[in-house]
Each structure stands twice: as C-alpha cells, then as structure tokens.
Amino acid sequence: MNIILFGPPGAGKGTQSQQLKEKYGLIYLSTGDILREEMAAGSEIGNKVKDIISKGGLVSDEIVVSIIKGRVGDNLNAKGFLFDGFPRTVRQAEMLDEIMNGFSLKINAVYSLEVPEEILINRMLERGKTSGRADDNINSIKHRFVEYNEKTRPVLDYYKKQGNLVEINGVGEISSIFDNICKEIDLLAVSH
Ligand code: AMP
C-alpha cells in the first residue's frame, strides 16, 4: 500500500504521518524532513537548497525526485510507502508515477487534508515559536502559500483524474482526523 498525504503547508501532514506510519508499518518519506537533514549535515544538496527553503520557495524537481527515487529503491522490501510533502508539482507527480512503475509499484491513494488558509497561517506562526524552522516566519509562510497555490494545488487535479483522490476534513481534533484517515485507508485495504 503506497499512499500520499497531501495538503497545504501547516495542514498537519507531519503530525498525522507519524501515527500513520506506525499503525500501517509504512516507510515514511518526507522530502521536507530529508532536506532539513541534508541542511543540518551541511551536505552539497543541503547547501544548495537552504536559501530557497528559508525563503519558502520550492526546491527543483530534479533534486527532490532523485532523493525519492533513491529512497524507494533502497526499500523495495517495504510493506508500503507514505509520502509527505511530495509530490508538490505536477511534474513531480508524473515522475513519481514513472519511478513507481519502474519498480512495479503504484500509488494507491492520495489523502488531501482540507484546511482554510487563515487557520493555517495562525497554526504555522504558532509552530514557529518552537519549531526552530527558518521558514516558519510570516514572509516565508506567505511565499509558501503562493508556491502552493500556483504549483502544488494543480497536483490535486492530477490525482482526481486518476481516481485516487480522497478529501479529508483537516480541521478538528488531531485524533478524530487520524480516525477519518484510517477509515479511508481501511476501506482501501478491503477493496484490494
Ligand atoms: P515541508 O517540511 O514539507 O513543509 O517542506 C519544507 C520546505 O522544503 C518547502 O517549503 C520547500 O522549500 C522544500 N520542499 C519540501 N518538499 C519539497 C518538494 N516536494 N518539492 C520542492 N520543494 C520541497
């Protein structure tokens, strides 16, 4: 079972993913986490992306796609993958399908967490007080939404056309949102 947790910045993808990967035994691939690790390690990739990330821009498709291809290839015996924060452009979504095809795998479902923008901005400013993330400040947050609306939102249509999109209300208690995602995943498991 290979699934994508989709949603705008601050929608709760990371929080929900932590519980989902445990419950379903999935390999968790968050491009944001991987890129932050690269920055912390001072690697070549990390140095290349740090200015873009701190300003809230999107890193190039080539960089994130090659990271994902490597991680999927390294874990071919996994029960499944949980992608968080990837794909973020239609090109990335197309490349992900190619990568998965190449390994005789496919994306089974995309869960989109729906949260209105004004709630998101407040959540992220709140998170910025403790997250230590260079991009949780108002200017970078605004730029992340511009990038999301222009480049990432169209990814929803890509998966809608494939019939893989499931919308989930992302407002409310963390545990009830989790339960709703689990219900959908369990339906998917039954239908396969
Ligand atoms: P996140 O932790 O998912 O909010 O990602 C933090 C930042 O990392 C984003 O604002 C982008 O700068 C970069 N990033 C993470 N994933 C991607 C991706 N799939 N494509 C491009 N940039 C990404």
Image (cartoon, rainbow, N blue to C red):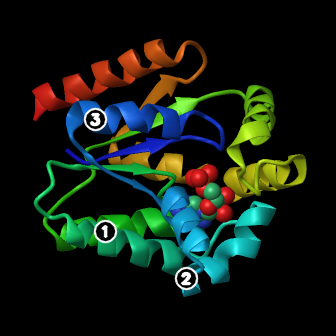
Q: CA distance from mark 2 to mark 1?
A: 17 Å
Q: Earlier in the sequence, mark 1 or mark 3?
A: 3
Count of marks overlaid on the render: 3
Q: Quadrant of ligand 1?
A: bottom right
Q: Residue at x 80, y 48 (%)?
A: 141
Labels 1 & 3 near each other (Cβ < 8 A): no
Looking at the rendered structure, the kind of residue marked 2 is Ser
Identify which residue, 147 or 165, lies in the foreground. Answer: 147
Judged left or right of residue 91, residue 131 is right
Name the mark nearer the viewer: 2 or 1: 2
Q: For the N terminus, give its image quadrant.
A: top left
Please name the residue that numbered disc 1 is placed on.
71
Graded by Cα atoms within 10 Å as few (under 14), some (14 to 19) or many (20 or more), the crowding at tag 1 reads some
Residue 73, relative to residue 137: is it above or below? below
Q: CA distance from mark 1 to mark 3?
A: 18 Å
Q: Residue at x 65, y 44 (%)?
A: 9
